[in-house]
Image (cartoon, rainbow, N blue to C red):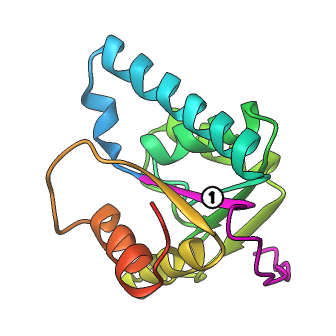
Amino acid sequence: MAQHTRIPQQRPAADRWPVAFGVGHRAIAGLSIRGKVRVIDETARVLAKLRDERGTTVGVSGMRPGWETTWAHAVLEAGLRLWAYCPGPWQASDWSGLQQREWASLLARADVVEYAGEQYSVAAVRRRTEMTVAAANVGVACWVNGRVNGETYRTLTHAVGRLGRPV
């Protein structure tokens, strides 16, 4: 069952971004070890900067494998609260056993777990994207390839184009 938590919609001071969402490609799995380490280190650096300079206390993840679970780990390691916004409880059902265990472990450590739908649908995936962006003041993206037709692209288009979120 989804945990439903009312998130207060407060306008922070212009220089404060208390909630940051992370979106990125699965393709980090195809990077070299050196490339993966660089992505992980850069993610940690950006989160520390948001925490220390912008007052970020929460990181929101859509919980897709690849960079979004890397983001979720980094959020927790930075001492921030994790809000996990999933399209549904079925999200990891066709992933590898290792990915399923990682997903379940991260959900268990999250302060908030929200599901956009109970059964698979493209609409639930898109609702999760909208929920993730709407909850945040700023976004962080890991853009590995030049695709302009996937969920990462749709998330960024929604965040910047429709809601005016800085990314």
- Quadrant of the image containing the C terminus: bottom left
| Residue nearer the viewer, 18 or 113 | 18
Q: Which residue is drawn at 25% across and 29% down?
A: 30
At mark 1, the secondary structure is: strand
Estimate how packed mark 1 is, as few (under 14), some (14 to 19) or many (20 or more) residues with alpha carbons within 10 Å.
many
Residue 19 occupies which quadrant of the picture?
bottom right
Query: What span is colored magenta in the figure?
Result: 1-23
Relative to 8, 149 lies left or right: left
Relative to 31, say whether 60 is above or below: below
- Amino acid under disc 1: Ala
Q: Residue furthest top?
A: 34
| Residue nearer the viewer, 117 or 56 | 56
Percent position of residue 15, x then y: 68, 62
Q: Which residue is drawn at 55% across and 66% down?
A: 90
Percent position of residue 50, x then y: 66, 45
| Residue nearer the viewer, 20 or 96 | 20
Is residue 9 on the magenta stretch?
A: yes
| Residue nearer the viewer, 6 or 116 | 6
Residue behind mark 1? 20
Percent position of residue 71, x then y: 56, 42
Relative to 56, say whether 114 is above or below: below
